[in-house]
Image (cartoon, grey):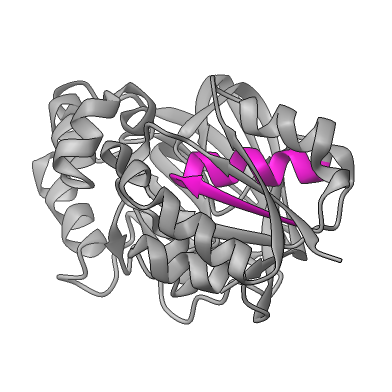
Amino acid sequence: MSQKLLFILNPHSGKGQIKFHLVDIVDIMVKAGFEVTIYTTQAQADATRKVVEDGALYDRIVCSGGDGTLDEVMTGLMQAELDIPIGYIPAGSTNDFANSLGIPKEMVKSAELAVGEKLFPCDIGDFNADTFVYVAAFGLFTEVSYKTSQQLKNIFGHVAYIMEGVKQLHDIPSYHMQVEYDGKIFQDEFVFGMITNSISVGGFKGMTGSDVKLDDGVFEVTLIKTPKNPIELNEILACLTNMIDDTDLIYSFKTSCVHILSKEEVSWTLDGEFGGIHEDVTVRNLKQRVKIFC
């Protein structure tokens, strides 16, 4: 008896390239012994709704889109408390998470992995009872991913994120925050922060530090202090691009849980999509909570 596979795809991700490969991808799935149901997302959070409503009917779920589409599928699994393995065929503009897992950007090759048997038990994040796959972030550059138009993302890829971010440098917002983790507490003014489980963010490798493992139960946390002058800003940028090894202007640490309290409401992004406005945030690592074919 054939196993049932739900194939959720975002037809607009990455220049809509899925339409050029769809027949080949479905053929790979059928030849692997799956009875395939295809669902194209119609709006934001549609993949989450589909998984919650119908996910339990399937043996495997494969999604194709950007990191945001994968985030929606994972969120659906958490909300429905399902333990179904996931395949991922990346089609976004940066595909940070796929790169970290070694999933190829060639869609047919990634489809072959998605119907294979090699599973990776991967950490994901709990963010105030919401779910994210690889990054929760606030501040400079974080509004970029959901304010940059889909068309711009498609044409320029991760360069689009830089272009939009550079336009914001003249008016950098700053946030006074208290940060607590592993019994330590400190306060400072921050221009940017990210809690990650990924080798690359925004298409750039090395920003999350060294020795990053996606199944070790801890996040990499990066908090950038507000620069007081152009010299400090240049020092921060040099550190982020690996031109210098260390700076007192950036806090970096690993933890399984971090609590961040701010004096004002702060916009957050989860996997590049708008994650709400919060003053009080608790982020927990859900160690090896999902299984991904890669």
Per the rendered image, the range of residues in magenta is: 60-78
Q: Residue at x 42, y 49 (%)?
A: 22
- x, y percent for residue 259: 70, 44
- x, y percent for residue 58: 81, 51
- x, y percent for residue 134: 55, 54
Q: Does the segment drawn in magenta span residue 76?
A: yes
Residue 208 visible, this orientation: no
Residue 222, by quadrant, is: bottom left
Foreground of the two, 214 or 35? 35
Q: How many marks?
A: 0
Q: Residue at x 48, y 31 (%)?
A: 273
- x, y percent for residue 63: 57, 49
Q: Is residue 40 left or right of residue 127?
A: left
Residue 148, by quadrant, is: top left
Q: Residue at x 18, y 54 (%)?
A: 237
Q: Does the segment drawn in magenta span residue 203?
A: no
Foreground of the two, 141 or 289? 289
Q: Is residue 88 left or right of residue 16?
A: right
Query: The N terminus lies in which quarter of the figure?
Result: bottom right
Query: The C terminus lies in which quarter of the figure?
Result: bottom right
Foreground of the two, 274 or 98? 98
Figure check: 249 above or below 80? below
Residue 104, by quadrant, is: bottom left
Residue 17 visible, this orientation: yes
Q: Is residue 77 left or right of residue 236?
A: right
Foreground of the two, 261 or 67? 67
Most frequent secondary structure within the magenta stretch? helix
Q: Residue at x 26, y 75 (%)?
A: 245
